């Protein structure tokens, strides 16, 4: 009889705890899928098909436009090269965010190169997962991935 009473009490406590915890879980999941970007994000992207890395800052205006300053480091293609090539350049662009927290950044690199970067907003808007599968011009067969974190 005592063990049955204990079991009933334990079950009631577990059900009450679950009833209090589940709504909090749902609100955290919804908060992670924000559909807007505003502010500055530091980013790092690595390219696996053509050894190079790019880092910088994206600044989103909340209305679909962005500015960025990027530094790209890549191997020098010269046969006798002993250093890497480093280039720093401001790159303007645009972005769209879908209702599920995914989106696309379009970067207009000086010289005519256009790079598309797919992203997913995570952690309530404080982080982005980035994936580029090449640009619309000049960067075919290029695969890069990385992350961005709100500054």
Image (spheres, rainbow, N blue to C red):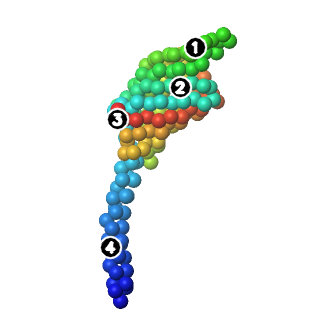
Query: How far separated are the C-alphas under marks 2 and 4?
Result: 53 Å
Residue extending furthest top?
Answer: 80
Residue appearing at x 60%, y 19% in the figure: 75
Q: Do the residues under discs 1 and 2 have CB atoms within 8 angstroms? A: no
Tell whether 25 sits left or right of 131.
Answer: left
Q: Is residue 70 above or below residue 131?
A: above
Q: Earlier in the sequence, mark 3 or mark 1?
A: 3
> Mark 1 highlights which residue?
83
> Mark 4 highlights which residue?
13
Label 1: state its secondary structure. loop
Q: Earlier in the sequence, mark 2 or mark 4?
A: 4
Q: Is residue 44 above or below residue 82?
A: below
Label 3: state its secondary structure. strand
In this orientation, does residue 8 appear? no
Query: How far separated are the C-alphas under marks 3 and 2?
Result: 24 Å
Residue 46: quarter of image = top right
**Mark closer to the observer (1, 2):** 1
Residue appearing at x 50%, y 25% in the figure: 54
Tell whether 54 sits left or right of 77.
Answer: left
**Mark closer to the observer (2, 4):** 4
In this orientation, does residue 16 appear? yes
**Mark closer to the observer (3, 2):** 2
Query: How far separated are the C-alphas under marks 4 and 3?
Result: 43 Å
> Mark 2 highlights which residue?
53
Can you give x and y, in whole percent of width and height, for residue 92 in the image? 43, 23
Residue 91: quarter of image = top left
Residue appearing at x 37%, y 40% in the figure: 126
**Mark closer to the observer (3, 1):** 1
Q: Earlier in the sequence, mark 3 or mark 2?
A: 3
> Mark 3 highlights which residue?
38
Label 2: state its secondary structure. strand
């Amino acid at each position: 009889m005592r063990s049955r009473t204990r079991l009933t009490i334990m079950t009631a406590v577990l059900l009450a705890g679950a009833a209090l915890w589940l709504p909090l879980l749902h609100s955290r999941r919804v908060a992670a899928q924000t559909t807007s970007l505003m502010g500055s994000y530091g980013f790092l992207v690595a390219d696996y098909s053509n050894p190079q890395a790019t880092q910088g800052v994206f600044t989103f205006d909340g209305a679909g436009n962005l500015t960025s300053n990027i530094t790209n480091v890549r191997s020098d293609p010269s046969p006798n090269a002993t250093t890497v090539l480093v280039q720093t350049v401001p790159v303007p662009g645009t972005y769209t965010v879908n209702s599920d927290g995914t989106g696309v950044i379009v970067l207009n690199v000086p010289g005519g190169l256009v790079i598309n970067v797919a992203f997913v907003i995570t952690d309530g808007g404080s982080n982005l997962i980035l994936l580029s599968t090449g640009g619309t011009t000049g960067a075919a067969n290029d695969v890069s991935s990385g992350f961005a974190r709100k500054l």
